[in-house]
Amino acid sequence: MIRNRNVLLVLRVIVGGVFIWAGILKILDPLEFTQGIANYRVFPQFISFSLALVLPWLEVICGFFIIAGIFRKASAFLVSCLLAGFLVLVFSAILRGLDIDCGCFGSLSRKADYKLILIDSLLLLFTLNIFFSRKTART
Amino acid sequence: MNLKKIVQHSALIIVLGSIIGLLSNLGLIKRYFRGEFRHAFISKEEYPSITFISLEEAEELFSKGETLFIDSRDKKDFREGHILGAVNIPFVQHKEKGLDLHFVPRQKTLVVYCDGSECQSSVALSKVLHKKGFAPIKVFFGGWKEWQKKRLPVERGDDSK
């Protein structure tokens, strides 16, 4: 576990920045993101639509809060839950042989594959580190 | 910080995100409840030439003979059976740039289909065709499953394009 406050700050900026960026791209094109969720063939249409309207804002808020140090633990907890959810979805898509976009960065999305699992796992590791870090990490 | 505080703050963030998300998309929510996205989540404004058709409409267009049916499933599925006279443009995401569309006529109505209502490749291919200037494009949402179920004309093998 990383305890150095400067390194923790870098982790917060990376995780927060990625989530703000991903959230904004989705907010700009909610239909594209809805289709992205629907492509996983897991949720009913209405759930996919509802998630597409709310999730991007949660990502932006959590990303901003993680960087700013507001509700840091709760934001890191929510981001960890989101990343865990993404990992399960992507893994299930690979197992079912679905050749789809991850839907993670709006129209700039990449393929839902093992590389994405690696990236998401790394982000999850960073976020868990932020979650378990003490308050001294604040700048 | 205790668990109770984390849960409380998390709930607060979720409520805040939900309120902003729903309020900023009121127009889209209205369109959803009007049934605009019943078949796929594509915007009429962005893709005005793409419409969705039923089996009966597809059958009617087929009998008129002035329509090109495009099968977006993979080569193997196409070879095993497809709508009579259809051409195969297997749609693979991330490989849109490599699609061979030179044989697709610009003066004909295009009917794009895939496996059935669950598959999305017909919609994805239609978007690409629309961006390349093809129109009108009709997505036969019931696809191969519905066509086959009604025992309408089919054939096996590769296409002749």
Image (tube, grey):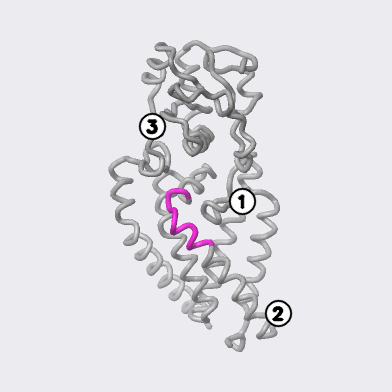
Q: Residue at x 59, y 43 (%)?
A: A100
Q: Which amino acid, mark 3?
A: Thr
Looking at the rendered structure, the secondary structure element under dot 3 is strand
Task: Report the side of B24 relative to B77 (left or right).
Answer: left
Of the 4 image quadrants, the one containing the C terminus of chain B is top right
Question: Which residue corresponds to mark 3?
Answer: B51
Question: Which residue corresponds to mark 1?
Answer: A110
What segment is highlighted magenta in the picture? A22-32
Nearest to the observer: residue A71 or residue A60: A60
Few, some or many C-alpha atoms within 10 Å of disc 1 (few <14, some 14-19, many ≥20)?
Answer: some
Residues flagged by tags 2 and 1 on a common chain: yes
* Labelled disc at residue A2: 2
Residue B66 within the segment the image draws in magenta: no
Establish if B61 lies above or below B90: above
**Disc 2: which chain?**
A
Q: Residue at x 47, y 79 (%)?
A: B5
Between the residue at mark 2 and the residue at mark 1, the CA separation in whole angstroms equals 30 Å
In the rendering, at what x and y percent does residue B61 appear?
40, 17
Residues flagged by tags 1 and 3 on a common chain: no
